[in-house]
Amino acid sequence: MGEKVLMKGNEAVAEAAIRAGCRLYFAYPITPQSELIEYMSRMMPKVNGTFVQAESEIAAINMVYGAAGCGKRVMTSSSSPGISLKMEGISYIAGAELPAVIINVQRGGPGLGDIQPAQGDYFQATKGGGHGDYRLIVLAPSTVQEFADMAGSAFELADKYRNPVMILSDGLLGQMMEPVDFKPHKTEEELEELGKQHYDWCMHPNEDEPNHHHHEINSLEIDPLVLEKHVIHLGEKYDEIEKNEIRYEEYNISDDNDVLVVAFGTAARIVKSAIDELQEEGKSVGMIRPITVWPYPYKAIADRITSKIKKVVVFELNLGQMVEDVKLAVNGKIPVEFLGKVGGILFTPEEAKTKILENI
Amino acid sequence: MEVIAQRPKSLRDIQFTYCPGCTHGISHRLIAESIDELGLRNKMMGVAPVGCSVFAYKFFNFDMAEAAHGRAPALATGMKRARPEMHVFTYQGDGDLAAIGTAEIIHAANRGEHISVFFVNNAIYGMTGGQMAPTTLPGMKTSTSPYGRDEKDIGYPITACEMLSSLKAPYFIERVSLLSPKEIIKAKKVVKKSLQFNKENRGFTFVEFVSTCPTNWGLDPIKARDWARENMFPYFPVKNFRDKSLNGGE
């Protein structure tokens, strides 16, 4: 595109997904992500792609399961209550080791909650959500640009590890407009290559004997010894992901830092303003912003616990979920303080500043 | 020497997991033979359900997906949309299709997805050990209706063909039975016809098999056959409900 376009996060991530080669999208409307499904309904026919408004979130994720089993780049999106419905399918997709991208534009919960931005689905996204031993790769954007860029990364990670990838966004990033720079569309040749990369396991047209294939897209292993092997293999894959894919941003990190802040997504964005103001006032605060919330940057946090830093302050838009991971990283060495806002309410930079000052 | 009977190419050389007297093996074979005869095997994908036929993904000799309970039509939708050059069927039992998967089957049918659905109705949950199904008959005793299905308490059996016939999109809907060689030969024609329509991408096709479950009915296969005739036929009449290829087509 060359120049920046002013777009809502929901639309930007949809456009970026199409450019990354997503030609199949199945979803069900829910606020505050409906611009995403609407954008896909407009744009997919223009790129000879498939858009289906499913009868439910459950059906949508199972359509994703079917299409992913065919080795194609496929995506669904929803907001918190709808993501809960998708958890069954996500567990199957993880078990069957299929590449797929799921976007969660989080809203307030539990239950129907409200339709304002929140980060209450952190546990669900990073610790399970569905049944069984599995992991989602979870990317947490904090700007509309990053949200859009993550579409491409999500598909690449999904293809690389044959694993579902979630973009854990929220109602603020979905609804907010910011200038976005898009990557160019994948070419026809690139799309064709993408289509073939999974031919050794996916469902695709067959040849006659002796090259006839019988591929099973499946998460069932009734023999415990076989299932044991499969789950151990999954575990090894997750270890590999933890080794290779941890991503985080260091903001204002220096040896002068008196306090270390940890926040992700929209919360991190708000805290940045507070950190900038404090810096001007001569107080040095550094922040680690996890970009992958699974795999989690435990070591990056642990490495910042220097003798000068007396406390870690964690900000989230929930009752305190990621703070548990920060405590694991800090391992009791120094106190971990927490400020959370719930109900779809955001904290202000001023409130963040006050909280940090209390702990300097 | 002339071969007059052999395993269809569309079935793999592994043993079925079904009980003696069960009709799943027959319906598998009818589908596999039809796929062979229509030359569809290299472009076929199937979806196995949860239930007694959960291992169908092992039995058919082409690409297969194993769905979560009831979700087969949603998987099939994703598969057909992802690979429109291929052909897709689902194979589902009564609990899978008419209880936990009612939303998926109704909406796949209503969208007129270009898939074939094969529905095995034996009025009981087999794999989990004989619990009440959505198609269990009034008064019928199962492990979760030990005093007999009380329609005042739990409603009447769901008639899938009749229900789907209320939708405009489906191309072909027929109920067949598998209780005698004559009926099986007739069923084969219907199965093949539905897959012929699938081959031509005409739309959504649905074939229900009135089947038996000797094990969980507690009857030997012959008595099970007679019981089905006497009790299931009045509720689940064997007939064609929709064929848009007739009367000059759609």
Image (spheres, coloured by chain):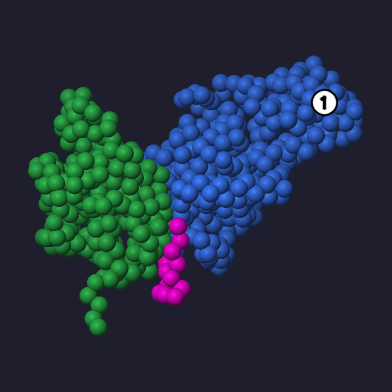
Chain colours: A blue, B green
Q: Position of residue A312 (x, y in %)?
A: 78, 25
Direction top: furthest residue:
A358
Residue B236 screen position, x and y as percent = 14, 44
Residue at 68 percent across and 50 percent down: it is A240
Left or right position of A238 against B129:
right
SS for dot 1: loop
* Main secondary structure type of the part rendered in magenta: loop
Is residue A224 visible in this depiction of the protein? yes
Instruction: Name the image quarter holding residue A183.
Output: bottom right
The picture quadrant where one finds residue A257 is top right
Residue B171, horizontal then vertical, whole percent: 22, 55
Callout count: 1
**B185 and A339: which one is in front?**
B185
Q: Quadrant of the C terminus of chain A?
A: top right
In the picture of the structure, the residue carrying the numbered disc 1 is A333
| Above or below for B236 versus A155 | above
Q: What residue sits 29% from the left and 50% below the top?
A: B19
Q: Residue at x 28, y 35 (%)?
A: B131
Residue A125's place in the image compared with A235, above or below, is above
Q: Position of residue A181 (x, y in %)?
A: 64, 49
Q: Amino acid at mark 1?
A: Lys
The chain holding disc 1 is A
Quadrant position of residue A12? top right
Position of B195 compared to A262: left or right? left
In the figure, is residue A295 to the left or right of A220? right
Furthest-front residue in this view: B220
Q: Is residue B54 left or right of residue A168?
A: left
Q: Which residues are magenta?
A: A205-216
Q: Tell me the crowding category of disc 1: few under 14, some 14 to 19, or many 20 or more residues within 10 angstroms, Cα based.
A: few
Q: Residue at x 80, y 16 (%)?
A: A358
Magenta stretch encompasses residue A260: no
